[in-house]
Image: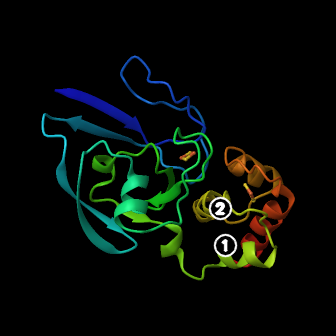
Amino acid sequence: MITQSICMRTISCTPLPCQAGRRHCVIDTPGAAPWIGETVLGPERETSCTIIVNGTSHTVAAAPDTPLIYILRNDLALNGPKFGCGLGECGACMVLIDGRAARSCVVALAAAAGRDITTLEGLGNCRVQRAFIEAQAAQCGYCLNGMIITTKAFLAHTPHPTDTEIRSALQHNLCRCGAHIEILQAVRRAAEAA
Ligand code: FES
Ligand code: FES
């Protein structure tokens, strides 16, 4: 039997397994998930697992170490989380797990079972999404899921952030288009709308 641990503090982690077989990471960002999910892989690779996404319970059949993003996008047709690096590095795939931002490409299905998962679709017409639209904070838009999810968790933790805190919170969400100025404006606007 193989035991695999997957760290949930998936903010710019080092995607290489450490000696304990873990993906581990080093960054503390307010609102990011700090806990570790343990996944035990048995001989039966596929099992049925129940996850709660956007308030609805879903039972899916998959190997317990399947990355959560595959379940969200392929099984549940929730395409808000984007697949970027697949290594916990870019932030495109972020979701909220129990209200904290986590990278769904490095969260195992079994680690997410029974937890409250919120995708971009589940945020609805929230002030963060409105602020990003009003600030026109996008070019291609591929990073926006991660930017919005990170901002949502960050503002819940730090409702009146300084510019330095905003930059720090978003520093591990990559935007290849260079829309950073507008994204920072959007976060400020969302904070002011609280
Ligand atoms: S961090 Fe998950 S796709 Fe890049
Ligand atoms: S807007 Fe294109 S990656 Fe950010």
Give residue 187's position: percent from left, percent from top. Answer: 75, 65
179 vs 148, nearest the viewer: 179
Which residue lies at the image location 47% right of the left edge and 44% below the top edge?
34
Image position of 48 with respect to 10: above or below: below
Which residue lies at the image location 53% right of the left edge and 32% below the top edge?
25
Q: Secondary structure at mark 2?
A: helix
Q: For mark 2, what is the residue?
A: 151
Quadrant holding the N terminus:
top left
> Can you name the residue that lies furthest to the top here?
19
Q: Is residue 183 left or right of residue 154?
A: right
> Can you name the residue that lies furthest to the bottom here?
125
Q: CA distance from mark 2 to mark 1?
A: 7 Å
Q: For mark 1, what is the residue?
A: 128
Q: Is residue 37 left or right of residue 159?
A: left
Question: Going from the N terminus, do you reach mark 2 or mark 1 first?
Answer: 1
Q: Is residue 133 left or right of residue 94?
A: right
Quick check: marks 2 and 1 in contact, CB under 8 Å? yes
Which residue lies at the image location 70% right of the left edge and 63% below the top edge?
141
134 vs 32, nearest the viewer: 134
Q: Amino acid at mark 1?
A: Val
Total tally of numbered discs in the picture: 2
Quadrant holding the C terminus:
bottom right
Q: Secondary structure at mark 1?
A: helix
Give residue 110's position: percent from left, percent from top. Answer: 27, 48
Which residue lies at the image location 26% right of the left edge and 68% below the top edge?
58
Give residue 155's position: percent from left, percent from top. Answer: 64, 64
Crowding near the residue tagged with mark 2, few <14, some 14–19, many ≥20 C-alpha atoms within 10 Å: many
